[in-house]
Structure formats: C-alpha cells, structure tokens
Image (tube, rainbow, N blue to C red):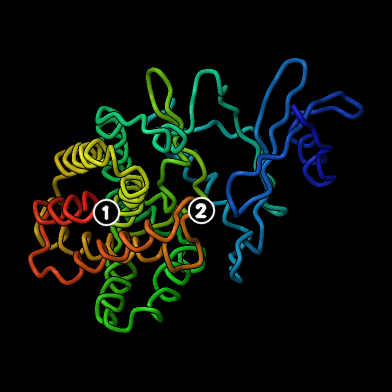
Amino acid sequence: MKTNKLPQEIYKASIDFGLLSSNQKYISKKITDGVSSDIWYVKTTNKQYCIKRALAKLTVKEDWYAPIDRNNYEVKYFTHCQAIQPYSFPKILGHDSKNFILAMEWFDNKKFIVWKKKLLEKSVSFKDGKRIGKLLSLVHKSFYKKKKYEKIFLNDKTFYDIRIEPYLIFTSKFYPEFYESYKKTINFLTKNKSTVIHGDFSPKNILLGKNYPVILDAETACWGNPAFDIAFFNNHIILKSIFNRKVFKSYLNLSNHFLKTYLASFSVVNNSNFISKFITLQALLILARVDGKSPVEYFKKQHKTLARSLAKNLLFNKSKNLNNFYKEWEKVVKT
C-alpha cells in the first residue's frame, strides 16, 4: 500500500477524536474516489477508520463550489439513520463541526465491495436492487412528513449548489427545447418536500456485504423530495446499461425490482402524478451526466449519443408511466 502523511488539520482532528495519540505510528492512504472531499484511510495497530474534510471547490473541470459545512448534515443523517437500520450506516467516531472534519468507521474491503465496481464488471443481481429499494423506502418512510426534521436538515444551499445548479440549471442551457421540463422539475424538487433524502444515493456510495448493504457519503442530505433519490440512483443503472449494452437486460431487471420494491413499500408516492414527474426528472438527470458539470467518466462518444437519445425520447413521450419508461429504455439501448 502506498502511504501518505496525514494533512496537519486531519492529523490533529484524529488526536482530538481520540483515534490517534501523539507520536503514535500509523498508516494512512488518501482515497481518490469522489470529487467533494479530502478523504483518508487510517490504520493503527488496533483500529482502522475513515476521516474526511469537505472541499469548498469540487475537483471537476467546471467551476463548482459548495458550502463546506455540509458534512455537519452527513453526521445528522448517519446518526438518525443508525436508529432506523444500525448496520447499514457508518458509526460516527468523531466530528469537528467548526473545521468540518468527520471520522467514521471503516468497512473492510474483504467483506464489502463498492457496488459501482460490481456493476461496471457486469455483476448484476436483481436481488441487490430489491435490497436497496427496501432500505431506501424504509428511510424515506421513517422521516416522511415529520416536520421536526425539516429544520434539522435545512441544507438547501448545499442541495442547490451540488444538485440543482450543476445538474439542471447548467445543463438546461444546452437544451432550450426542454425549458418547461427543467422549470417544472426544479419547482417539483424545491417546492414539494416531504422527507429526508440522501442526495447522492448512487452505487459508488453503496457497499454490498454478504448480509446487508452500507450507505456512505451523505453530505447532500436534506429535507427534500423522495423522487430525487430514486431517480439519481436509477440514473446510474441506466448509464451502466448503456455502457454494457450486451447485458443491458440485467440492468433493466435490477431497476425494475428496485423501483417496484420501493414503490410497494412506500405506497404514498405510488401514483401516476409522482411517477410522471419522476420520469421527467430521470430524463434530465441522464442529460446532466452527459452535458452537465459531472459527466460520466467512462462514457465514449457512442454512449453519449445513446444517452441523449433515451433522455429525449422519455421527454417527448407524453404518456409517462413505468411501462413506457422501460419500453423506451430497452428500445434505445438494444439498437
């Protein structure tokens, strides 16, 4: 393992949290995945942990800034979700709310695998989709319309800076023909809030273990619209089906089980109006990962073309239901 010395502020925080003592030997490695935080793995003779510090400017090509107090909300999210499903969310080991440094438990990579890695390697199981759909619906239901959480998770600035602006507002300038769709979707997300959402619910932030999944990276957690989490997650499944077209049906099957399990468990959103708006949001998120500030890193020209085609077909289709959604998805990807 290539090791690096911990930055001074993170080293000091580790000592303040009681995770390290002065002059104690340790091994540390900078984790390069992700664009929003400075993240480190640390190992001593008797413990392992992860420690992270939020970045003001995200590490992407475009100028992209976000509030650095966002990991304060990550702590709140994990703390509250621990009470819902303890083993599926990391334990907080230390938190400096002034310097925005957070330490949490480390999950052994011999026992857990990042789901994104499995999906890119074409290891796709509908059972995983069902597990994740059930877990997400459980979290959304637990917070649903409980107004006390609206104040606790008042993280609107982060959600705007990390999701609304780079994914929708920025991308909309390339698609003036969909102006009304962008306008209505932004209104749907910002004016129709009913639960605590994760805000970055994607396979790169989900670890799969033998018995249960673990959810990571909740910096964007806020009081919001549940449609965002399910569309954001499903977007990654769509993108991977375009990338691995030879096995696209396995991704469709995974998505179908995820959505059916989620909607069956969280029946208050299982209606035609919500699903229609979810599909519009889904299409706009596809365009965001092609032409927005956070483009898919593994896409080539042909993948981008297919993604744009699918998104446009979904937006132009006036009958937005799940049956047509999957028909359009299959029609484009198998061409």
Which structural element holds mark 2? loop
Give the tally of numbered discs. 2
Residue 318 shows in the view: yes
Closer to the camera, 9 or 36?
36
The residue identified by callout 2 is: 297
Where is residue 154? Give x, y as percent: 46, 61
Where is residue 332? Give x, y as percent: 21, 56
Location of residue 286 (image quadrant): bottom left
N-terminal of the pair, mark 2 or mark 1, is: 1
Q: Label 2 to label 1, Cα distance in Å?
A: 37 Å
Closer to the camera, 320 or 211?
320
Please state if 52 lies on the left or on the right of 261 as rendered: right
Is 172 drawn above or below residue 124 in the view shown?
Answer: below
Three-letter amino acid code of the residue under disc 2: Glu
Which structural element holds mark 1? loop
Is 192 drawn above or below residue 132 in the view shown?
Answer: below
- Residue shown at 53% from the left, 47% from the top: 74
Three-letter amino acid code of the residue under disc 1: Lys
